[in-house]
């Protein structure tokens, strides 16, 4: 019979042999970063050593209390030393500055990735800073909740969700496959997409809905005090869903809007035209127009249900 | 020891003695109508006899299969005979026609009520048709799901939610209190409100969010085929919530929009100004404006959580 120590050692050998990365560094231990850390721990096979890095001492201390990794380091330049994979989990507006700090310290052969919701801006900001011998593989897991911080992470946040990988044509295929393997290891499905196309699709499915939700919550908040109180009191289901969307992190979303400006403004302009047409139909009592538009909008819901995305 | 028959008879006596209404008629056995019927059955004390009426033979037959009431009747003029309470659960655009049909057949002393989402239009359309000796008490339970029909009803749909009662100054106080008792018996909280004020509050918390959700789903559906497919595939959480809201009944919502035109268009106009200002800030990179607006919108979410409405 084998001893417990033998099994523990054997298990470690297997874990090391099977792990995609030897030393994985997560920079930024918010909702996404801490979900990656928890998932890597829960599902195994992703990293031999998990290094957690956050410039915010409070978040880093909390990550350590939660036991999210093996190594904790506040300085990103120190954290990335000797790593074979570094994932930047910071708001997209902070990635250029962060990449500039870590670039000189990245090991040859390392893979650099991110989880940003806009991909053209990330390619524009980060790719020029990546040193020779390091491969940059931009990625975007389409998952989240309205909560933020190291406590908000969920091991199964990515389970059954999509993670989009947006490599450039010249990106090393082996590195792309390793990042895809990481996301599949966390339970996600992966797809490859051109960065510009990614930004257009995300503008309509995520960025515009958030801009609208933030706006209508502000519109309600600006109402006269008496009505505002009743808005809160009688918030029907429609409004509750909007406030849930609007509860997300302000800096993250500010950065997303500014870094996907063109696609977002195009989708906003299409939406505005459609909304004005609907308001006009309400004003002039165009029953058929209103009913048909509502029926059309149900089609897309039905398709989502058929695709198991509802 | 008492026999089972004794207990059954005793229970019926108690039930009858305690019930608010002797004969309650629900006209329209959709989501709201069937939820009232299920709740009345589940919680007791509301009606001695429940009469289910629906002009759609399929819905009526289904209600009978589900055992939602004691009496089933397709003709509303026949259904209301001898009732001490009639609740019209039809789209607000259909209430004038329905009230005209049932008015001559309402018993003296009966209470007529409704569940419409717009209250000024209901008072305008129904009040003039109500015969002397009958009291009209308009009401609006703020609860719902995106599903429709007799199968969609839930006994606890109204539990913990608000039901707004909008009597006119001359409405008989006893009748108002009976309708309030009915809603509290179904688990709801009640509040009284002026019909015009009701319509303004509902315009921002429910009608405008639905108009926006219908619109953005249509905007997405109009995108070029390739992008549309990916919109469906990668629907992030923001878009999923919008499609859920947009899945509601087209005729019901068409009627709501047309019957709360003024308040809805005023709220839409406020929202449009705010959305244009946000889009302009994105175009010109006004970081502070965007971040502050997002922070403001979180405040209203926080208030909802504090009020237990989130």
Image: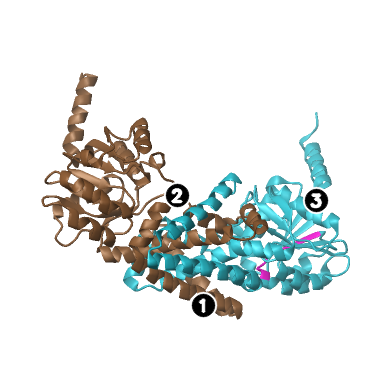
Chain colours: A cyan, B brown
Tag 2–tag 3 contact (CB < 8 Å): no
Q: Which residue is mark 1?
A: B277
User: Where is residue B87 drawn, in percent x and y?
Assistant: 25, 46
- Pointer 2 and pointer 3 on the same chain: no
Q: Is residue A67 above or below residue A169?
A: above
User: Where is residue A4 drawn, in percent x and y?
Assistant: 76, 36
- Pointer 3 and pointer 1 on the same chain: no
Q: Is residue A116 among what the camera can see?
A: no
State the residue in front, A65 or B77.
B77
Residue A294 inside the magenta-drawn segment:
no
User: Where is residue B165 drawn, in percent x and y?
Assistant: 25, 56
- The quarter of the picture where the N terminus of chain A appears is top right
Tag 3–tag 1 contact (CB < 8 Å): no
The chain holding disc 3 is A
Q: Which residue is mark 3?
A: A20
Q: Residue at x 22, y 24 (%)?
A: B7
State the residue in front, A143 or A86.
A143
Residue span colored magenta: A85-92
Q: Which residue is mark 2?
A: B146
In the picture, measured across the screen, residue A117 lies left or right of residue B93, that is right
């Amino acid at each position: 019979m084998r001893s417990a120590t033998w099994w523990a050692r054997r298990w470690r050998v297997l874990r090391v042999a099977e792990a995609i990365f030897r030393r994985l560094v997560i920079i930024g231990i918010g909702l996404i970063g801490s979900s990656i850390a928890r998932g890597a721990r829960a599902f195994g096979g992703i990293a031999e050593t998990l290094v957690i890095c956050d410039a915010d001492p409070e978040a880093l201390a909390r990550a350590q209390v939660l036991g999210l990794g093996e190594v904790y380091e506040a300085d990103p330049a120190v954290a990335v030393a000797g790593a074979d994979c570094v994932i930047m989990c910071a708001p997209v507006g902070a990635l250029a500055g962060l990449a500039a700090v870590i670039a000189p310290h990245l090991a040859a052969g390392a893979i650099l990735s991110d989880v940003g919701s806009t991909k053209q801006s990330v390619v524009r900001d980060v790719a020029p800073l990546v040193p020779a011998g390091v491969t940059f593989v931009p990625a975007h897991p389409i998952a989240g909740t309205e909560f933020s911080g190291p406590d908000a992470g969920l091991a199964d946040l990515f389970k059954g969700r999509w993670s989009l990988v947006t490599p450039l044509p010249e990106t090393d295929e082996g590195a792309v496959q390793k990042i895809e393997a990481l996301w599949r290891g966390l339970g996600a499905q992966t797809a490859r997409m051109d960065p510009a196309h990614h930004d257009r699709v995300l503008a309509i499915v995520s960025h515009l809905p958030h801009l609208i939700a933030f706006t209508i919550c502000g519109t309600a908040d600006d109402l006269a005090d008496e009505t505002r109180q009743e808005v809160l009191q009688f918030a029907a289901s429609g409004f509750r869903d909007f406030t849930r969307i609007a509860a997300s992190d302000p800096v993250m979303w500010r950065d997303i809007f500014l870094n996907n400006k063109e696609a977002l403004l195009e989708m906003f302009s299409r939406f505005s035209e459609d909304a004005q047409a609907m308001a006009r139909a309400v004003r002039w009592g165009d029953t058929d127009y209103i009913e048909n538009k509502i029926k059309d909008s149900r089609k897309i819901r039905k398709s989502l249900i058929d695709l198991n995305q509802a």
